[in-house]
Amino acid sequence: MGLGGAGWRSVGSKAHRWGCRWGCLRLRGFSSAALPSHMEAPTLQSVGFIGLGNMGSHMARNLINAGYRVSVHDVNENAMKKFSDDGIPTKRSPLEVSESSDVVITMLPSSAHVLDVYSGGNGLLGNGGRLGPWLYIDSSTVDPQTSRKISMDISRCRLKEKKGYAEKPMMLDAPVSGGVPAAEAGTLTFMVGGLEEAYVAAKPLLLAMGKKLIYCGGAGNGSAAKICNNMAMAISMLGVSEAFALGQNLGIKASTLTDIFNCSSARCWSSDTYNPVPGVLEGVPSSRNYDGGFTSKLMAKDLDLAMASASGVGYKCPMGSGALNIYQKLCEEGCDAKDFSCAFRHYYTGKDEK
């Protein structure tokens, strides 16, 4: 989904910003200082991709189309068959993926799935602490604590053999924004946390799947940015939906309010790009009975991550908490598979534009 710009302090102040625990991880990979000419950059050519759902399948296809040697794994045999039918190597476990890859990318539904794929039986890190891939990129939407735990676990491992100037394996948390259409078109936005040197090295790989990369700082900061973005997106959608429904009850057409919002201070993505009122904007979920898009179930999951993370640092988010309650209620009432913009109709009882 949409992402506004963000500013970040220079890499030189990392340890002060994140605290020593995360800032000091910078010292455990490779230096950004000038390297001797005989030292080569670690290769990105062999890529393992785990998680072939609505997003991951398109991301993996874009890597293949860009010329990378890709092998894939998913617990869903049917998802893997679509790749094996096209001659793409499929692997039986995450560990098997890692054994043939320079880089591994994961795109999974939840924190529990991510922890299992990395640290569970036959997981990516299940080779006695000696790893083949030099870089791991997790594009799942998870809580920052999960990203930081896995990053720390990886930093304690060793490479089976040195890969260019990478002396130790590294991880980037790189969740995405843009949804399925952007995944298919290769125009995703990546919010990236981890070592800046690893981010710079991974840019060509990420740009094969997206068009905008934003470096967010140390380990877990990409995941933090993602859940903050989605919390703001939920609150915005609910605010716009509430205003449209009020306008209808006051006798103002939603299309008229949309014209006003979009040229005034209420303008936002939820109004001008992803309008929730059926009949106002073509090509969005509200124009097809809220099918497709970003489901209410996923929005509830992301809001739950945001609230749990807020609780972990003792911060109160009253609007985020209210948004979570609304999306949980929508899921309980059978709207879990509907796009999250369905709140306009199914929570605020808004009407279609005639």
Image: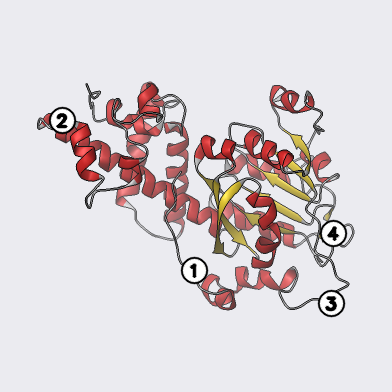
The secondary element bearing badge 3 is classed as loop
Residue at 78% across / 23% down in the picture? 85
How many other residues sit within 10 Å of disc 2, few (<14), some (14-19) or many (≥20)?
some
| Dot 2: element | helix
For label 4, the residue is 159
User: Which of pointers 2 and 3 indicates the residue nearer the eye?
Assistant: 3
What amino acid type is highlighted by mark number 1?
Answer: Trp
Q: Earlier in the sequence, mark 1 or mark 2?
A: 1
Query: Which residue is at a point 61% across and 41% down the rendered structure image?
Result: 112
Residue 215 in picture, x, y percent from top left: 56, 62
Task: Examine the rendered structure and indicate whether residue 99 appears above or below residue 284.
Answer: below
Mark 2 vs 3: CB contact within 8 A: no
Q: Earlier in the sequence, mark 3 or mark 1?
A: 1
Observer-nearest residue: 134 or 220?
Answer: 134
Q: Which mark is residue 8?
A: 1
Indicate which disc, 4 or 1, sits on the residue closer to the N terminus.
Answer: 1
Q: Which residue is mark 2?
A: 248
Report the mark closest to the observer, 3 or 1.
3
N-terminal of the two: label 2 or label 3?
3
Along the polypeptide, which appears first: circle 4 or circle 2? 4
Q: In the image, which is nearer the foreground, mark 4 or mark 2?
A: 2
x%, y% of residue 183?
57, 39
Judge by depth and name the residue closer to the eye, 42 or 50: 42
Q: Which residue is mark 3?
A: 36
Q: Residues within 10 Å of mark 4 (few under 14, many from 20)?
A: some
